[in-house]
Amino acid sequence: KDFFNNVKKKGEFFHEGLKKIKDKYPEIIEEVRGIGLIKGLKMSVDNDEFIEKLMNNKMLTIKASDNVVRLFPPLIVNNEELNEALDKIEKTCNQMK
């Protein structure tokens, strides 16, 4: 019950967190894209290097076109896990400076 409504709320929560990181690191992240929980970060830096640093911070992701890092958490993710992902993304942005 309310599963998809909860997924939508989690997607909005994740998007807001990613936008805050983008605003803090505009020299690293150019744009936050996506719908629901499927997100893409258009990078101002090399996405291969960013993905490698994310992996070193224990977060797996893949690259997409246009120098984009694809984020695709499972639909059953919770806000605590999304916050952990946001922390790792922010840590990686800080390492890219």
Image (spheres, helix red, strand yellow):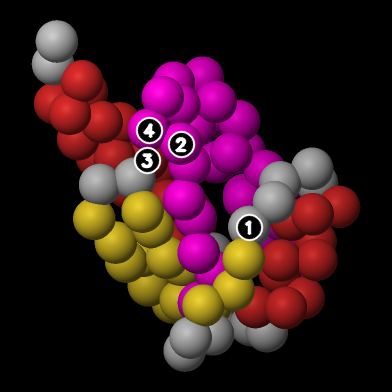
Q: Position of residue 60 (x, y in %)?
A: 69, 51
The residue that disc 3 covers is: 14
Q: Secondary structure at mark 1?
A: loop
The residue that disc 2 covers is: 74
**Could you tell me the amino acid type at mark 1?**
Thr
Residue at 48% from the left image edge and 86% from the top image edge: 65
Q: Position of residue 25 (x, y in %)?
A: 54, 64
Judge depth for marks 3 and 1 and give the one in front.
1
Asked whether residue 35 is in view, the answer is yes
Part of the protein shown in magenta: 68-97
Q: Which mark is residue 75?
A: 4
Q: Which mark is residue 61?
A: 1
Callouts 4 and 2 close, C-beta under 8 Å: yes
> For mark 2, does the 10 Å Cα neighbourhood hold few (<14), some (14 to 19), or many (20 or more) residues?
few
**Could you tell me the amino acid type at mark 4?**
Leu
Q: Is residue 47 above or below residue 69?
A: below
The mark nearer the N terminus, 1 or 2, is 1
Magenta region, main secondary structure: helix
What separation in Å lies between label 3 and label 4 (alpha carbons)? 12 Å
The magenta stretch spans residue 34: no
Asked whether residue 20 is in view, the answer is no
The mark nearer the N terminus, 1 or 4, is 1
The mark nearer the N terminus, 2 or 3, is 3
**Could you tell me the amino acid type at mark 3?**
Phe
Q: Position of residue 46 (x, y in %)?
A: 68, 84
Given residues 15 and 8, the one toward you in this image is: 8
The mark nearer the N terminus, 3 or 4, is 3
Q: Position of residue 41 (x, y in %)?
A: 46, 67
The mark nearer the N terminus, 3 or 1, is 3
